[in-house]
Each structure stands twice: as structure tokens, then as C-alpha cells.
Image (tube, rainbow, N blue to C red):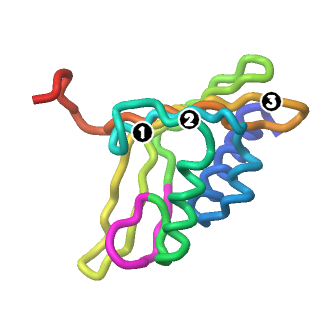
Amino acid sequence: MSHDQEIHQILLHHLDTIMQNDVSAYNETCTEDLTLYEWWVTPHRIDGLPFHEFMMNANDKRGTVFGAEGDPAPVRFDLANLHIQRYGDTAIASYTLMISTALPEGVKVASHNESRVIVKIDDKWKVVHVHKSPAWQAPHIPE
């Protein structure tokens, strides 16, 4: 397996833990000091795992997953324009995350750009930082 394929598989597993609302598996794929920028949640950095633990547990209770809209419905994710950069024990994966939800009125696709920094710690790859930005032309200065 090439270095890029290894990181790609690790990334897919990490994202799948989110889509499955599997908090313990998700925590295994991240460091405890994980940092994130999620533009639609808050303009500030989010630190640590509790934010997503709460979100995944709440989603699991209502029978839905991250990014899905409306009542529980079949959901899939795709990574468009995936680019992996690896520098020793550090890798950066950048892509457009597309989440498709099968709704009664048809399939709805939401997307945003992501970068995930993945570092090898004690022989295990862990996500240490995530940065998300809109996949549409956002205004440079808020109105």
C-alpha cells in the first residue's frame, strides 16, 4: 500500500466513525487536544473531543448523522478533489466533503472544503486539526 493509500484509508475510517456516530471509535482516531474550525458552527476555534462527543450522541439519539437534513434518511459522503501531502509522520488531507441525503423530495447534497492534519503518534495515525470552509463564494467581510 502506498503512503497516499494508507492515509486515504485512515481518513475514510475516521470520517466513517463520524457518520456512524461511533464516539469511542472516533476518539481512537483523534488526539485529545484536537482543534477544529467549523465555519457554520462558530467563527472561533473548537478545542478537544467533548464538542463532537455531544453532537454524535445527540445525532445517534435522533437517528441521524452529521450533515444530514430533515428526518433520518440514507446518507453517504464523498471526497472530491482529494489531495494528500505527506511529510514523514505528518500528513495533510484536503478535499471537498460532499454529503448526500436521500430525502422524499429528492437527493440533497451539501458540501464544504476541509483540511485534516494527521500525525503518527506511537505508531498510530491520529487527526490533530481540522479546518473547514465554505465551498461557495463567502463574503470576505461580513455584512
- Label of residue 120 in the image: 3
**Quadrant occupied by the N terminus:** top right
Q: Nearer the viewer, residue 109 or 139?
A: 139
- Residue 73 on the magenta span: yes
- Label of residue 38 in the image: 1
Regarding mark 3 in the picture, which secondary structure is present there?
A: strand
Across and down, in percent, residue 2 comes to 79, 34
**Which residue is located at x 61 percent, y 39 percent?**
48
- Label of residue 57 in the image: none
Answer left or right for 112 relative to 27. left
In the picture of the structure, the residue carrying the numbered disc 2 is 47
Across and down, in percent, residue 23 comes to 67, 59
Answer left or right for 139 relative to 71. left
Marks 3 and 2, the one that precedes in the sequence: 2
Compared with residue 79, is residue 137 higher up or lower down, i.e. above or below? above
**Which residue is located at x 32 percent, y 73 percent?**
70
Taken as a whole, is the magenta stretch helix, strand or loop?
loop
Across and down, in percent, residue 109 comes to 33, 59
Magenta extent: 67-77
Regarding mark 1 in the picture, which secondary structure is present there?
A: strand
**Quadrant occupied by the C terminus:** top left
Could you tell me the amino acid type at mark 2?
Asp
**Do tag 3 and tag 1 residues touch (Cβ < 8 Å)?**
no
Query: Mark 1 packing: few (<14 Cα in 10 Å), some, or many (20+)?
Result: some
